[in-house]
């Protein structure tokens, strides 16, 4: 891993949070604002270090909370837990399988909003719970599951495009002696 990968992940988180706040297309059509940070956390947990996961949770959570009605910092812990739990078992996860990406996106996109609501309830905030919340949670979970494999395709393409790949050494050795005889 090089320094470009964490920078691209954090830049994408910043742009994703900005686009979520600036454009209301999904909010008008579905009544739900789609959250891209859990999908991005799945990619970071499978592809980056724990430092990148922590930076994404802290900065992404603060950016998201500053542009939403959430108390500042409430989203940091659910994002970090989602990324850390995947990071612990990433050696066992089949990263290249689209189904595994889909399942992890489904789990993370479902876990983060529920954990945020639980934290809001423990802080004695008054989130609006009901059938509307159930609809929003289902749409956010399904959209996160669908967008996670697309995020992997985007970042793998950027990685292939922008990161230097070392050349494999050839089997020919320049220092060997060639003996010619009769």
Image (cartoon, rainbow, N blue to C red):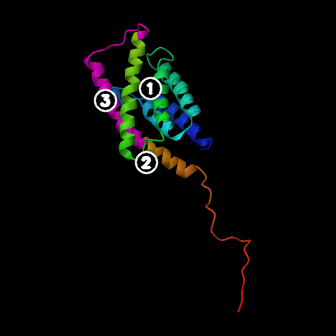
Q: Nearer the viewer, residue 180 or 22?
A: 180
Q: Which residue is mark 2?
A: 96
Query: Farthest residue in the left direction?
Result: 131
Residue 101, percent across and down? Answer: 40, 41
Query: Nearer the N terminus, badge 3 or badge 1?
Result: 1
Res 165 quadrant in image: bottom right
Element under disc 2: loop
Crowding near the residue tagged with mark 3, few <14, some 14–19, many ≥20 C-alpha atoms within 10 Å: many
Q: Nearer the viewer, residue 76 or 16?
A: 76
Query: Farthest residue in the bottom direction?
Result: 182
Q: Could you tell me which residue is drawn at 52 percent across and 41 percent down?
A: 47
Residue 139: assigned label = 3
Q: Which residue is mark 1?
A: 21
The quadrant of the rendering that contains the C terminus is: bottom right
Q: Are marks 3 and 1 in contact (CB under 8 Å)?
A: no
Q: Main secondary structure of the magenta part?
A: helix
Q: Could you tell me which residue is drawn at 52 percent across and 22 percent down?
A: 62
Residue 121, percent across and down? Answer: 39, 11
Q: Is residue 88 left or right of residue 35?
A: right
Magenta residue check for 164: no
Residue 149, percent across and down? Answer: 40, 42
Query: Farthest residue in the top direction?
Result: 124
Q: CA distance from mark 2 to mark 3?
A: 25 Å
- Classify 116 as above or below 163: above
Q: Nearer the viewer, mark 1 or mark 2?
A: 2
Q: Is residue 77 visible?
A: yes
């Amino acid at each position: 891993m090089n320094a470009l990968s964490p920078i691209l992940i954090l830049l994408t988180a910043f742009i994703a949070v900005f686009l979520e706040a600036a454009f209301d297309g999904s909010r008008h059509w579905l009544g739900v604002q789609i959250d891209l940070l859990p999908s991005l956390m799945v990619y970071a947990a499978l592809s980056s270090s724990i430092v990148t996961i922590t930076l994404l949770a802290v900065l992404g959570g603060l950016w998201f909370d500053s542009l939403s009605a959430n108390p500042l910092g409430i989203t940091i812990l659910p994002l970090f837990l989602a990324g850390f739990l995947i990071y612990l078992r990433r050696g066992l996860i089949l990263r290249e399988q689209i189904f595994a990406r889909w399942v992890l996106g489904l789990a993370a996109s479902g876990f983060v909003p529920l954990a945020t609501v639980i934290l809001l309830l423990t802080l004695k905030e008054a989130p609006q719970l009901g059938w509307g919340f159930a609809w929003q949670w289902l749409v956010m979970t399904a959209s996160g599951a669908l967008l996670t494999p697309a995020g992997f395709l985007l970042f793998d393409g950027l990685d292939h495009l922008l990161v230097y790949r070392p050349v494999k050494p050839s089997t020919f050795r320049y220092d060997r002696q060639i003996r010619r005889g009769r």
